[in-house]
Image (cartoon, grey):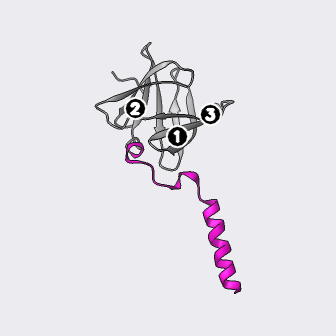
Amino acid sequence: MKIANLIACAATVMLCAAPAWAAAPSAKIAATFGNTVMSIYPDGRSQKIWLKPDGSWTGQSRRGHPLAGIWTAKGDQVCLKQSRPALPFGHFCQVFPNDPATGVDSKDLTGAKIHLKLVRGHVTKAES
């Protein structure tokens, strides 16, 4: 009896401790790993995001400042929670592009129109 209880307790702890990102992301989201998701603004400046399979992300703002946080998947949407610099609200979700030949027209968290583009590799400069 004791061994069965210990095994059940250990299994419960392991399940509760499993990170939210442990579930496999969709193929569309997985296509971004190792690549750059570029948010291109009407003025030509761009923000870059790099998703990591471990649930973290890094980025570079339109002004070149470092960004970082965690991400989760909600269907084919990616929800970003920014911790560097910290933002006062929760998270922001949007569909990320998964094909370098096409992009996605969207809006940023302030409502500004942007074009999201997937660029192969870890790109730090704007590409047309």
Q: Residue furthest left?
A: 101
Q: Amino acid at mark 3?
A: Arg
Mark 1 Cα shell of 10 Å, populated few (<14), some (14-19), many (≥20): many
Q: Residue at x 49, y 39 (%)?
A: 78
Q: Quadrant of residue 28?
A: top left
Mark 2 and mark 3: Cα distance apart in space:
20 Å
Q: Amino acid at mark 1?
A: Trp
Mark 2 Cα shell of 10 Å, populated few (<14), some (14-19), many (≥20): some
For the stretch drawn in magenta, what is the main secondary structure? helix
Mark 3 and mark 1: Cα distance apart in space:
10 Å
Mark 1 and mark 2: Cα distance apart in space:
14 Å
Q: Which residue is mark 1?
A: 57
- Magenta range is 1-30
Callouts 2 and 3 close, C-beta under 8 Å: no
Q: Which residue is mark 2?
A: 123
Q: Which residue is mark 3?
A: 84
Q: Secondary structure at mark 3?
A: strand
Q: Earlier in the sequence, mark 1 or mark 2?
A: 1
Mark 3 Cα shell of 10 Å, populated few (<14), some (14-19), many (≥20): few
Q: Secondary structure at mark 1?
A: strand
Q: Magenta stretch: residue 25 in it?
A: yes
Q: Magenta stretch: residue 43 in it?
A: no
Where is 58 relative to 7, above or below? above
Front position in the image: 78 or 123: 78
Quadrant containing the N terminus in the rendered view: bottom right
